[in-house]
Image: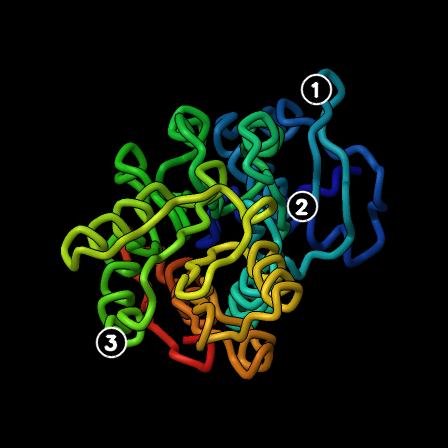
Amino acid sequence: MSIIRVKENSDIPKYKQIIKSVEDAIVNNQVKRGDKLPSINSIKNRFSLSRDTVLLAYGDLKVRGIIQSIPGKGYYLKRENIEVSQKIFLLFDELNAFKENLYKSFLKNLSPTIEVDIYFHHFNYEVFSKHIYDNIGNYNHYIIMPANLIDTDIIIGKLPKNNVYILDQTHEELSKYSTIYQNFRKDISVALTQCLPQLKKYHTIIFIFNKNKQPQEMLHGFYDFCSKHNIDHEIIINSDNRTLQKGEVYLIPEDRDLIQVIKKMKEQQLSIASDIGIISYNDTLLKEIVEGGITTISTDFNEMGEKLAALIFHKELTKIENTNRLIVRNSL
């Protein structure tokens, strides 16, 4: 006996009746994980439905992770938990303390019936592409952090436009998607201007900038500031082979480089603030404590998570610039 029930004279849309039939069969133990479900053609023919109606029902169950399709074989029950109302694909560049705050804030502000699967591309275009290609059609929403990878629009364009949300760093070719972003060029220029009185105590600003990981707009904002205020500056990739000099102030986006500079200061018996200034990027609890407190330029990642959850809930097509602020501590 088929588990599918569809009533002709019902106020409930037929595709929803198919969904409910499968859910009821799971609850009533009529089907178990791994069991094959009635084929699309059998349901279509039995109830005189269009193929699209059945596909719509099975598509909903598929993106919720309840069923799976195996090419050439059909549809099978994948999981017995029917409480999941939506599934979200979340693609980060990497996981660190502040991205973890974003992730936790996002989950906290979602309905408990929404399930989130998180992936990482580690600034690798091939990994980025594979994660997306492997998951086309498997999720209700796709949240993507493209970082500074180029040509991501080609891959992202394979996904339904209204189901895509771009996070943190965006590009002109991704302008058609809903976005919560940082204005890196403006934020770094404004923050450095705010601490200009402290910066004047030093003779050179050293920006440790890795073009493979950091937004190019951040570099443009740094140049804007230095040019406007006639500040001596230098760009380096890392501090590995550098000898620190008194009167330098370091602008450091990566925490690995921050640790390296502090270690070198101790080795050279230099004092933070009085000898060497430090401005880090992205605030964490640890930076409130280390060396009496590290000055940071930081967006509010908890706020970003809250806004992202609201965007998903309201299904808005919009662009939101996230809050950014300078936190001055004892490292200047």
Measured as percent of width and height from the top left, residue 37 is found at 75, 34
Q: Considering only order in the chain, which callout, 3 or 1, is on the residue closer to the N terminus?
A: 1
Q: Quadrant of residue 39?
A: top right
Query: Could you tell me the amino acid type at mark 1?
Result: Pro
Would residue 138 be seen by someone viewing this image from the given angle?
A: yes
Contact, CB < 8 Å: mark 1 with mark 3?
no
Q: Gap in Å between the C-alphas at discs 1 and 2?
A: 17 Å
| Residue found farthest to the top | 72
Q: Nearer the viewer, mark 3 or mark 2?
A: 3
Which residue has dot 2 on it? 65
Residue at horizontal 60 percent and vertical 46 percent from the top = 240
Instruction: Describe the element under mark 3 as helix, strand or loop.
Output: helix
Residue at horizontal 66 percent and vertical 64 percent from the top = 267
Residue at horizontal 39 percent and vertical 77 percent from the top = 327
Q: Considering only order in the chain, which callout, 2 or 3, is on the residue closer to the N terminus?
A: 2
Q: Gap in Å between the C-alphas at discs 3 and 2?
A: 56 Å
Query: Could you tell me the amino acid type at mark 3?
Result: Pro
Residue 234 marker: none
Q: Nearer the viewer, residue 12 or 214?
A: 214
Q: Considering only order in the chain, which callout, 2 or 1, is on the residue closer to the N terminus?
A: 2
Q: Gap in Å between the C-alphas at discs 1 and 3?
A: 65 Å
Instruction: Describe the element under mark 2 as helix, strand or loop.
Output: loop
Q: Quadrant of residue 158?
A: top left
Instruction: Describe the element under mark 1 as helix, strand or loop.
Output: loop
Which residue has dot 1 on it? 71
Up the image or down, 60 lies above or below 114; here it is: above
Which residue has dot 3 on it? 197
